[in-house]
Amino acid sequence: MSDTVAARLRKLLDGHRLTPTQRRIAHSMMGSATAVPFMSSVEVAELAGVSQPSVTRFAATLGFDGYPALRRHLREASSDEEEDAPGTSNEYQQAVAGELENLRRLSEALADPGPVTEAGRLLASSSPLPVLGLRASASQAYGFCYFAAKVHPDIRLLDEGGSMLRDRIDAAVRAGASALLCFALPRHPREVVEALAHAHKAGLTVVTVADSTLAPVARHSDVLLPVAVGTGLAFDTACGPMLLGRVLLEAMCDHLPEAQSRLEAFDTEAAARRLFAE
């Protein structure tokens, strides 16, 4: 019975973007699948360590008119659904499996390299090249910039919001920038959407790595490269966006004639300075 309930829960959760609180509820219910169909919303709230209204909102997010309707749905779990349960894998393994599926879909999308190739050309031709990523996307922007700075003459990381963000975009335009790269992963800060609108108005071509073609930043992006994030844990995982960022960097290098010589110069200097332990 518990496997069937867990299977029903997984089917309900598939395709829904949950808040961290809602994911906590989902994980708690998955971990107590045998008992959940007979628990009240108050008991589920205590199990997950959240408020009772959060459980009600969770049920509504899944398409039910309240928690009792969700509970009835789980009670109706029948034995013929057991084959849909994913064996004995735990939630951590399921999160990894979800990311593997995201990477498989990314591989299929890259069968047509045209969009990435065009994006690489646009980014390589921009000097300076501003790279925007706020909040959850900041680490993706930083990682891209760390490597891109080894092959591009002027990379400018924009990983802090506030009143200075537009000023820094404007400064990049005055310095000769023609394009901006943005990493836009959920949840999407309103400030990023506004910054991209300003970048467009300032004349920049916007290349965006986002989690969906329906992301709020899509309407301000000239080249949108969608790649899913993992949603199997309390917080999103971003293996796909990280890998796509490296692919994009590779495409950019193909349009930077001095990329290889810059890398060789860095390796020579790193060896002379003994930067690395190996």
Image (cartoon, helix red, strand yellow):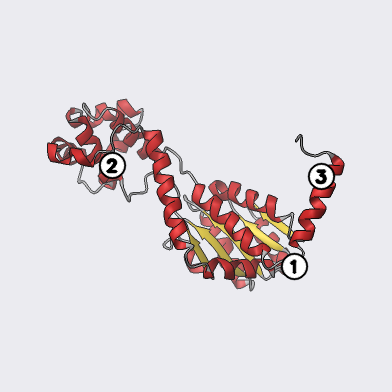
Q: Which label's residue is closer to the chain start, 2 or 1?
A: 2
The secondary element bearing badge 1 is classed as loop
Kindly report which numbered mark, 3 or 2, lies closer to the viewer in this rendering. 3
Q: Which label's residue is closer to the chain start, 3 or 2?
A: 2
Question: Label 1 is placed on what type of residue?
Answer: Pro
Question: Label 3 is placed on what type of residue?
Answer: Ala
Q: CA distance from mark 3 to mark 2?
A: 49 Å
Frontmost residue, 178 versus 266: 266
The answer to whether residue 86 is left or right of residue 209 is left
**Can I make out residue 78 in this image?**
no
How many residues crowd around disc 1 within 10 Å: few (fewer than 14), some, or many (20 or more)? few
Question: Label 2 is placed on what type of residue?
Answer: Arg
- Label 3 with label 2: CB-CB less than 8 Å: no
Q: Position of residue 130 (x, y in %)?
A: 67, 60
Frontmost residue, 168 versus 10: 10
The answer to whether residue 179 is left or right of residue 276 is left
Residue denoted by label 2: 10
Frontmost residue, 120 versus 142: 120
What's the residue at 54%, 56% (across, down)?
244
Q: Which label's residue is closer to the chain start, 1 or 3?
A: 1
Q: Position of residue 68 (x, y in %)?
A: 17, 37
**Can I make out residue 205 in this image?**
yes
Residue denoted by label 3: 270
Question: In the picture, residue 128 is in which quadrant?
Answer: bottom right
The secondary element bearing badge 2 is classed as helix
